[in-house]
Image (spheres, helix red, strand yellow):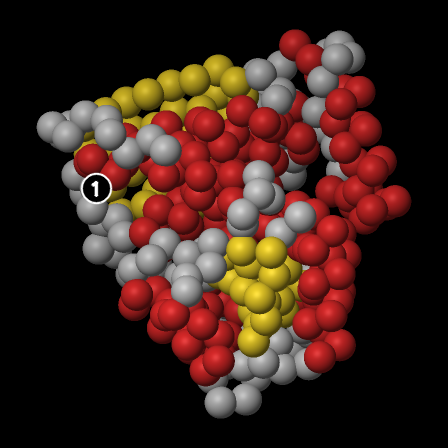
Amino acid sequence: MSDSVRILVVDDSGTQRFLLQSVLRPAGFEIVTAVDGVEAFELVQRDPPDLVVTDLQMPRMDGLQLVREIGQLQLSIPVILTTAAGSELIAAEALHAGAASYVPKSGLSTLLLPTVRRILELKKATQENKALSACLDEVTYQWRLTNDPSLVPDLIGRVESILSELIPFDQSQHMQIAMSLDEAIVNAIVHGNLEINSEIRQLDDGQVYFETIDKRRKTPPYCDRRVLFRIEANRQRVTFTIRDEGPGFCVDGVADATDPANLEKAGGRGLLLMNAFMDELQYNDCGNQLVMTKRLGSVVEEAIS
């Protein structure tokens, strides 16, 4: 995937730019850097990168304004924010403005590379599946998924191809839908069916986390469980239902996505993204089913007020 993929890294701190490059360059990505949003936007206009990783707080043009300016170009360039403690409000605003995701600076070494790879997978799947059903008026699809996270980008690509002919979401909205589905479906597989705690992702650079996923995918009762994924869409709205066959959880204990303190907590990041990108989120009483709704032309309420 890293072949000929060019990433623009934007940060006014030379130390942070070096750190970001040290995480991304060994994976084979070509790295271009900028010291602020103004220089970054000039580079984007002159030679668009495949993806942008940017700090939020910078002189001349900050990360929020950079997200807005890139969005105006309609080039389908995903933007990942790097966030420091105290920047939660701006981060939430940038997500609503069109950023694809964010990574706390405290978790750059473990979260940045997987986030970059996942977004590039979703972008590729979306771009390769746009030639379906120009005359769709209403659709309902349903899948029963095995516990294989590698299936998710292809599934999302299929969903995006359907939606691209049905609802005129812009490119930023399509990426936000893709990110929300990725978070929800992978969560149903890993934390629902496989019952793996988010906290272990911080252990040994994530090695324990991925080894546990691989082991439980082959071990009863986990391996026998499936994830139901259902999409119901017309030209005004789309509803996604994701239900796992795990034991569920206490819905009252879900981290408050409107609380800035949860921005860097395990599990809090995905919940904030889904709340920022979708119009409605609703769990069932058992906690093993999530229904997400996105409406055309709606204004999503702020995830952090």
Q: Residue at x 50, y 57 (%)?
A: 51
Q: Residue at x 61, y 61 (%)?
A: 31
Counting from the top left corner in percent of width and height, residue 163 is at 27, 36
User: Residue 96 occupies which quadrant of the picture?
Assistant: bottom left
Q: Nearer the viewer, residue 156 or 117?
A: 117
Say which residue label 1 marks.
167
Q: Residue at x 50, y 67 (%)?
A: 92
Q: Is residue 157 visible?
A: yes
Counting from the top left corner in percent of width and height, residue 33 is at 59, 71
- Relative to residue 80, is residue 187 depicted above or below? above
Direction from residue 133 to residue 249 in the image, left or right: right
User: How many marks overall?
Assistant: 1
Residue count near mark 1 (Cα–Cα under 10 Å), binned few <14, some 14–19, many ≥20: some
Q: Is residue 265 visible?
A: no
Counting from the top left corner in percent of width and height, residue 36 is at 54, 81
- Relative to residue 56, is residue 95 depicted above or below? above
Direction from residue 109 to residue 62 in the image, left or right: left
> Three-letter amino acid code at disc 1?
Ile
Q: Nearer the viewer, residue 154 or 191?
A: 154
- Relative to residue 35, is residue 142 depicted above or below? above
Q: Residue at x 42, y 57 (%)?
A: 77
- Relative to residue 214, is residue 103 depicted above or below? below
Counting from the top left corner in percent of width and height, residue 195 is at 72, 28
